[in-house]
Amino acid sequence: MSVRRLAAVQPDSFAFKPETLEKANWWIAKYPENRRQSAVIPILWLIQKQEGWVSEPAIAVVAEMLGMARIRVYEVATFYTMFMLEPVGSAALIQVCGTTPCQLRGSEALMKVCKDKIGPKDKLSADGKFYWQEVECLGACTNAPMAQINDYFYEDLTPDNLAQIIDDFAAGKTPKTGPYNGRFTSEPLGGATTLKDPSLYDGSAARPVKIPNAPEAEVKA
């Protein structure tokens, strides 16, 4: 794993928004007082959702809140690659999967689109709207090549439709998520070959079952 460091330029301070602080306190309350440090990962995640990234002042605030040494919070933030350690785009954080299945299906062409339209990877774009990076497997190999953009998967991509997705984000639009080749999820491109009867999985064949010792209650099985 590459070395991960905090950004060279840091904000002067960090403050929780009221709704973020409420959620942070909810996480802390889930643990005994002497185990409040267990909330460090979800609180860092809440900070990232608020700010887009995790700054050094934010790490200091979390350390004080949880009674931890700053270095311990720093260790968590730098170890887990889900935490961004420098500002990301205001419109989109694009994470292109570069692992073997996606690479064999054209991820390098997707990265070229990102480079041409946004700039170098791991750098904030000149307009401050985009940040893109190459990441390891995101677990959607059947829908390769794919990318995670902000919180969602964009799958079965081509250079053309990724370029359009970037243009849409730049224009303030919200492009549709999921596959871009016409399929619904990850079924075969030619259509399903097994489990063709929807009643096998859509719940329509479920029947009421009486629960012992509870004659008025029913569940579907």
Image: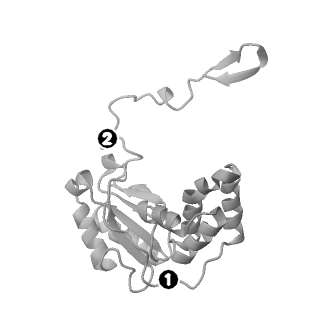
The residue located at (35%, 29%) in the rendering is 194
Q: In this view, does 38 lie above or below 13?
A: above
- Residue 190 in the image: state x and y as whole percent: 29, 41
Q: Is residue 133 above or below residue 87?
A: above
Secondary structure beneath label 1: loop
The residue type indicated by label 2 comes to Pro
The residue located at (35%, 35%) in the rendering is 192
Q: Is the C-beta separation of discs 2 and 1 under 8 Å? A: no
The answer to whether one can see residue 108 in this image is yes
The residue located at (52%, 32%) in the rendering is 202
- Residue 218 in the image: state x and y as whole percent: 71, 22
User: Which mark lies nearer to you, 2 or 1?
Assistant: 1
- Classify residue 36 by image quadrant: bottom right
Judging depth in this view, the residue of 47 and 39 nearest the camera is 39
Looking at the rendered structure, which numbered label has been put on residue 188? Answer: 2
Instruction: Write down the residue under mark 1.
Output: 10
- Give neighbour class at mark 2: few <14, some 14-19, many 20+ (Cα, 10 Å): few
